[in-house]
């Protein structure tokens, strides 16, 4: 069953996120091995989390560091989520929810990257980040 009336070609892989224990070695490894370029890198002092978006050709890899990440049961370093770009985050997440998908972060705006985003789980528990461009108010 298709959750959208749009053609499948309107969906695009946006990025893949990997959880890392330390940001600098992760960034350096991808720069050294794949000539990755840092697109964006930032940290949140309150949570202690860090992020880096790396460009590898036309692909974006997101590295994420979360303090004490691997001390929780079931959490391991490696693949964290797959980002999928859609035309409308709210519409897609609504249809996924109606179809029984677990939504564990409702759609919200992320101004830094001009996106609307949400997190859902697929049937195996994999995390999917649903992303659409942030709609701006018309003057």
Image (spheres, rainbow, N blue to C red):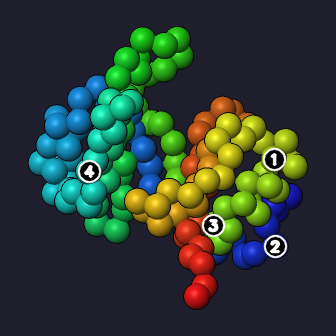
How far is mark 2 from mark 3, CA to CA?
A: 12 Å
Residue 85 screen position, x and y as percent: 57, 64
Foreground: disc 1 or disc 2: 1
Which numbered dot is residue 5?
A: 2
Which numbered dot is residue 97?
A: 1
How far is mark 4 from mark 1, CA to CA?
A: 32 Å
Q: Residues within 10 Å of mark 1 (few under 14, many from 20)?
A: few
Q: Residue at x 14, y 43 (%)?
A: 28
Which numbered dot is residue 41?
A: 4
Residue 79 screen position, x and y as percent: 45, 36
Q: Residue furthest bottom?
A: 139
Which numbered dot is residue 86?
A: 3
From the image, which quarter does the N terminus lie in? bottom right
Tell me the element at label 2.
Answer: loop
Tell me the element at label 4.
Answer: strand
Upstream in the sequence, badge 2 or badge 3? 2
* Side (left or right) of 53 relative to 71: left
How far is mark 4 from mark 3, CA to CA?
A: 24 Å
Q: Residue furthest front?
A: 139
Instruction: Tell me: residue 10, above or below residue 102.
Output: below
Q: Residue at x 23, y 36 (%)?
A: 23
Residue 102 screen position, x and y as percent: 75, 38
Q: Disc 4, disc 3: CB below 8 Å? A: no
Upstream in the sequence, badge 1 or badge 3? 3
How far is mark 1 from mark 2, CA to CA?
A: 16 Å
Upstream in the sequence, badge 2 or badge 4? 2
Residue 69 visible in the snapshot: yes
Q: Residues within 10 Å of mark 2 (few under 14, many from 20)?
A: few
Tell me the element at label 3.
Answer: loop
How far is mark 1 from mark 3, CA to CA?
A: 15 Å
Q: Quadrant of residue 130?
A: bottom right
Residue 131 visible in the snapshot: no
């Amino acid at each position: 069953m298709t959750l959208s009336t749009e053609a499948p070609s309107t969906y695009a892989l946006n990025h893949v996120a990997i959880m890392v224990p330390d940001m600098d070695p992760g960034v350096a490894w991808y720069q050294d091995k794949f000539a990755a370029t840092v697109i964006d890198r930032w940290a949140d002092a309150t949570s202690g989390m860090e992020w880096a978006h790396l460009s590898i050709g036309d692909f974006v890899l997101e590295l994420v560091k979360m303090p004490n990440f691997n001390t929780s049961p079931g959490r391991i370093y490696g693949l964290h989520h797959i980002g999928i770009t859609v035309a409308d985050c709210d519409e897609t997440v609504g249809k996924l929810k109606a179809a029984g998908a677990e939504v564990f972060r409702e759609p919200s705006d992320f101004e830094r990257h001009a996106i609307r985003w949400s997190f859902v789980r697929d049937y195996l528990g994999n995390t999917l980040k649903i992303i659409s461009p942030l709609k701006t108010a018309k003057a």
